Image: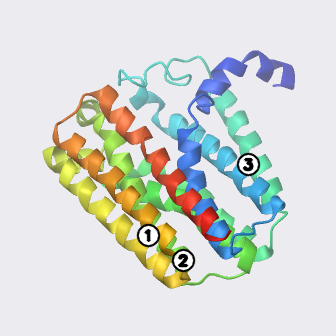
Amino acid sequence: MNAVYLWNKRREIAALIRLDKQYGTLLLLFPTLWSLIIASEGRPSLKHLVIFTLGSFLMRSAGCVMNDMADRKFDAQVDRTKSRPLASNQLTMREALVVLAVLLSFSLFIVLFLNTFTILLSFAALFFAFIYPFAKRVTYLPQIVLGIAFSWGNLLAWAAVRGDLTLTPFLILLANLCWATGYDTIYALMDSEDDVKIGVKSTAILFGSGSWIAVGGFYGLVVLFLFLIGKETQIDWGYNLALGGVGLLFLFQVVQLRKSPARAELFSLFKSNVWVGLLLLFALVFNYF
């Protein structure tokens, strides 16, 4: 399988890695940048910015490939996912494996530009990304595993700058873990009826009609942990003002969830979390001006 062959499959590969749907990459990138900015006191190096931005894209893409490889038979039974390249046989497992190998090789290459401690930590990120697709087969809390996977970049960013880990990156991890569990519960609600039929588990199925309460609880914890991060790092009032805005965005999502929205509305609510991450990122950047 050569480069020309892969080029001829470029549309299918683009669909496999969700190239046109980069909100997932942004949700992975934002907490990583929060950590990078705080650890570097508002002056992250260009090298770190490039590595962690590119790394977020590569690892989110690799995660999509691993998820589709594991779920190809399930995806074929769900209306929303049955047209995915592996579920619809537009790509073979061997072709997907080659794409995954390329993504992971590039990821490893850029990580090698970081310190040894960060390199060692990066293998744990791969572990959580690998087990997530299988977690939904054995537990109703696979969103917790996803939350850890989506939070690990924050630890890597902090370790890359400081060479160690302190309380702050773990507070960011807890905040992002609760955030990811909340927004991925909203995402899972889109497929909950199909998931029940095929035997896939999720927090959306676990909480059922009370999902809006559960999401509200997770979002409340996010605000709490973000507030503690501000106290720990002595960030100024602008951060707390942004935190108030985040709380309002979360409240809007919960109120809408209580109305049992249709799939399209659920998807819009899920994607609106990009604004949460962006608002906090701006607050942190301006804090250090």
Q: Quadrant of residue 15?
A: top right
Between the residue at mark 1 and the residue at mark 3, the CA separation in whole angstroms equals 29 Å
- 104 vs 5: above or below: below
Q: Residue at x 66, y 26 (%)?
A: 13
Q: Choose the circle earlier in sequence order: 3 or 2.
A: 3
Mark 3 or 2: the one toward you? 2
Amino acid on which the number 2 mark rests in the picture: Ile
Between the residue at mark 1 and the residue at mark 2, the CA separation in whole angstroms equals 8 Å
Q: x, y percentage for residue 94? A: 67, 30
| Marks 1,2: beta carbons within 8 A | yes
Give the labeled residue for mark 2. Answer: 235
281 sits to left or right of 164: left
Which mark, by number, is residue 133? none
- 163 vs 184: above or below: below
Q: Choose the circle earlier in sequence order: 1 or 2.
A: 2
Q: x, y percentage for residue 80? A: 39, 24
Give the labeled residue for mark 3. Answer: 54
SS type, badge 3: helix
Give the labeled residue for mark 1. Answer: 240
Q: Residue at x 69, y 70 (%)?
A: 42
SS type, badge 1: helix
Amino acid on which the number 3 mark rests in the picture: Leu
77 sits to left or right of 109: left
